Amino acid sequence: MKKLLTIIASALIMSAMVSCDNDDDKTIDTEKPQINASIDGASPANAATFYFGEEIPVKLLLTDNEELGSFSVNIHNNFDHHSHSTEEEGEDHDHEEGEEHHDHEEGEEHHHHEGEDGDAFQFTQDYTIPASSTQFLIDTKIALPVKSDDGDEYEGGDYHFMITVTDKAGFSTFKAFEIKILQKE
């Protein structure tokens, strides 16, 4: 009987050790998602020109080692010629999990800012990515209205097109493109 209890105790201890070892095999996703702007037909590109009343084609490949979560697009004026880190170095800017990130309701938001010579166009929209996706091809178009909600024409000039992708673990990467948006003559 004593031998049987020793065997059972040994089996329980081995079982507990194997169970603990399995917990160690679970890894935490610390790899950031990627934005690939070098695919065939990628858009937008730095220095591209678009026109109010037309559309900006958006074609970029998003990837993550575990699972993608969502992405957002922001277009804002660059009349003051500010820069974002991705423009100077060609690298993505990463946000660690827990850093401040402003989310918007899914859907389209158009804003305008009254400038000296007219309204500056601004666009923000969040998108969800299907669950369990490790790759997602963005292939869409963003309409550029000619006038703001109050009827004023948008001011043409230098703009930034920014895309941010966030994975399910909460890590995000953004890429900024310098573009021009002009009124047709």
Image: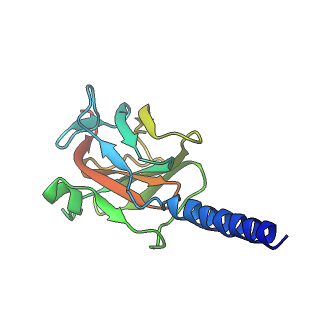
Image point (23%, 44%), residue name: 180
81 relative to 133 in the view: left or right:
left
Q: How many marks?
A: 0
Q: Position of residue 170 (x, y in %)?
A: 49, 61
Asked whether 73 or 10 is in front, the reply is: 10
Image point (25%, 26%), residue name: 40
Q: How is the image coloured?
A: rainbow
Asked whether 6 or 118 is in front, the reply is: 6
Image point (26%, 41%), residue name: 182
Quarter of the rendering occupied by the C terminus: top left
Name of the residue lying farthest toward the top: 40
Q: Position of residue 52 (x, y in %)?
A: 34, 37
Quarter of the rendering occupied by the N terminus: bottom right
Name of the residue lying farthest toward the right: 1
> Relative to residue 61, is residue 124 depicted above or below?
below
For the question of whether residue 150 can be seen, the reply is no
168 relative to 154 in the view: left or right:
right
Q: Position of residue 41 (x, y in %)?
A: 27, 26
178 relative to 145 in the view: left or right:
left
Image point (60%, 55%), residue name: 105
For the question of whether residue 147 can be seen, the reply is yes
The image quadrant that residue 139 belongs to is: top left
The image quadrant that residue 179 belongs to is: top left
Asked whether 81 or 33 is in front, the reply is: 33
> Relative to residue 53, is residue 80 depicted above or below?
below
Q: Position of residue 143 (x, y in %)?
A: 43, 35
Asked whether 112 or 18 is in front, the reply is: 18
